[in-house]
Image (cartoon, rainbow, N blue to C red):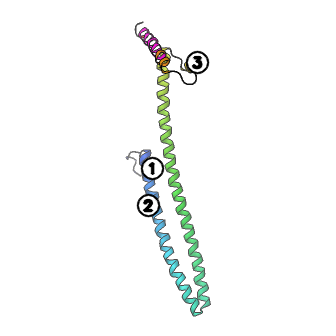
Amino acid sequence: MNIFTKKPTAKEALRESKREMNNATRGIEKEIGALQLEEKKLLAEIKRTAKTGNEAATKVLARQLVRLRQQIANLQGSRAQMRGIATHTQAMHAQTSVAVGMKGASKAMSAINKVLDEIGVDIATQLSTAPKGRIATKRTEDASSSGLDELEQRLAALRNP
């Protein structure tokens, strides 16, 4: 381990982890394929020895076939676990990305609150006194223009103490 290298970012670590998981999964799939091919050969050999009537050899080959199938099942379970781990890792990264985004949004909201408090606008009372439902557009324009004028007057008063 080199102490002089910089620590990888979360994105780089995820990318490296994903690459290693895919590589390991491919290796397991390659082994599964080789074992399945061996299983076919073993089945053919079992049929051949059964036709000749060699019961002892057939039993030995059948035991080998059972062990081989168990190995294949174990490898398939391992492959599924690897894929699950990769998916879980990616989900964790997505969750941290959302958390970072929420942190930025909360900072922005607190900054907006601070500005509105300086101006003297209380959002909670504005929202609680706001009428519910649809309002005619003419009334909205009149109300917003009078509200804008009032806000501009307050801002001017704040600028000129």
The C terminus lies in which quarter of the figure? top left
Across and down, in percent, residue 135 comes to 53, 21
Magenta segment boundaries in residue numbering: 143-157
Q: Is the residue 13 above or below the residue 79 in the image?
A: above
The residue to which callout 2 is attached is 23
Residue 96 within the magenta-colored segment of the rendering: no
State the SS at label 1. Answer: helix
Residue, x 46% and y 68% (percent of image)?
30
Residue, x 45% and y 54% (percent of image)?
18
Q: Nearer the viewer, mark 3 or mark 1?
A: 3
The residue to which callout 3 is attached is 129
**Going by the picture, which residue comes out furthest to the bottom?**
52
Q: Is the residue 2 above or below the residue 99 in the image?
A: below
Q: Quadrant of residue 151?
A: top left
What main secondary structure does the magenta stretch of the protein show? helix
Q: Tag 2: Cα neighbours inside 10 Å, few (<14), some, or many (≥20)?
A: few
Residue 152 within the magenta-colored segment of the rendering: yes
Q: Is the residue 140 above or below the residue 63 in the image?
A: above
Q: Is the residue 106 above or below the residue 22 in the image?
A: above
Task: In the rendered structure, find residue 158 and report the number of the disc placed on it.
Answer: none
What amino acid is at disc 3? Answer: Thr
The residue to which callout 1 is attached is 14
Q: CA distance from mark 3 to mark 1?
A: 49 Å
Q: Tag 3: Cα neighbours inside 10 Å, few (<14), some, or many (≥20)?
A: few
Across and down, in percent, residue 4 comes to 37, 46
State the SS at label 3. Answer: helix
State the SS at label 2. Answer: helix
